[in-house]
Image: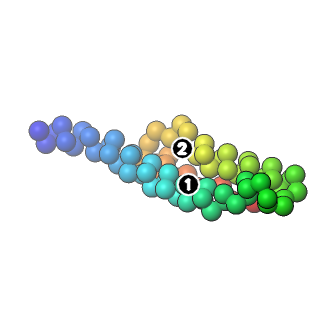
Amino acid sequence: SKADIEAQFPAVELEIAMADLRNNRNRALKDSDWSVLPDVTLTPAEKSAWMNYRTLLRNITDGLDTVDEVQSTTLPIAP
């Protein structure tokens, strides 16, 4: 019924918002893959900063339950 379909809108909207956030996150992870290659010359502090950044990216969707939460989430700034 129409009501059943409309009842699914919030879940679908959340999944679309999460997919968009995940795509942005995945792009940022890909763009920072170079930082974890074994032949990259970084100071220990730089390596730690990049590792922390990538951890924040991987965990960015944790605990997000609403479209508003997802849409108000911003990616961390790369070191």
The relative height of residue 31 versus residue 18 in the rendered view (above or below) is below
Mark 2 vs 1, N-terminal side? 1
Q: Are marks 2 and 1 in contact (CB under 8 Å)?
A: yes
Work out whether residue 25 or residue 4 is closer to the camera in this orientation and state it.
25
Determine if residue 50 is in view: no
Q: Residue at x 60, y 46 (%)?
A: 58
Judge from the rendering whether residue 71 lies leftward or rightward of residue 3; answer left or right: right
Q: Residue at x 52, y 58 (%)?
A: 24
Quarter of the image for residue 46 reads: bottom right
Instruction: Assess disc 2: are there few (<14), some (14-19) or many (≥20) residues with their C-alpha within 10 Å of its C-alpha.
Output: some
Quarter of the image where the C terminus is located: bottom right
Instruction: Assess disc 1: are there few (<14), some (14-19) or many (≥20) residues with their C-alpha within 10 Å of its C-alpha.
Output: many
Residue under numbered circle 2 = 61
Q: Residue at x 80, y 49 (%)?
A: 48
Tell me the amino acid under the disc marked 1: Arg
How far across and down, in percent of the image, does residue 33 sit? 66, 57
SS class, disc 1:
helix
Q: Residue placed farthest to the left in the image?
A: 1
The relative height of residue 55 versus residue 46 in the rendered view (above or below) is above
Tell me the amino acid under the disc marked 2: Thr
Quarter of the image where the N terminus is located: top left
SS class, disc 2:
loop
How far across and down, in percent of the image, does residue 26 sit? 54, 55
Determine if residue 23 is in view: yes
Work out whether residue 15 or residue 58 is closer to the camera in this orientation and state it.
58
Residue under numbered circle 1 = 25
Q: Nearer the viewer, mark 2 or mark 1?
A: 1
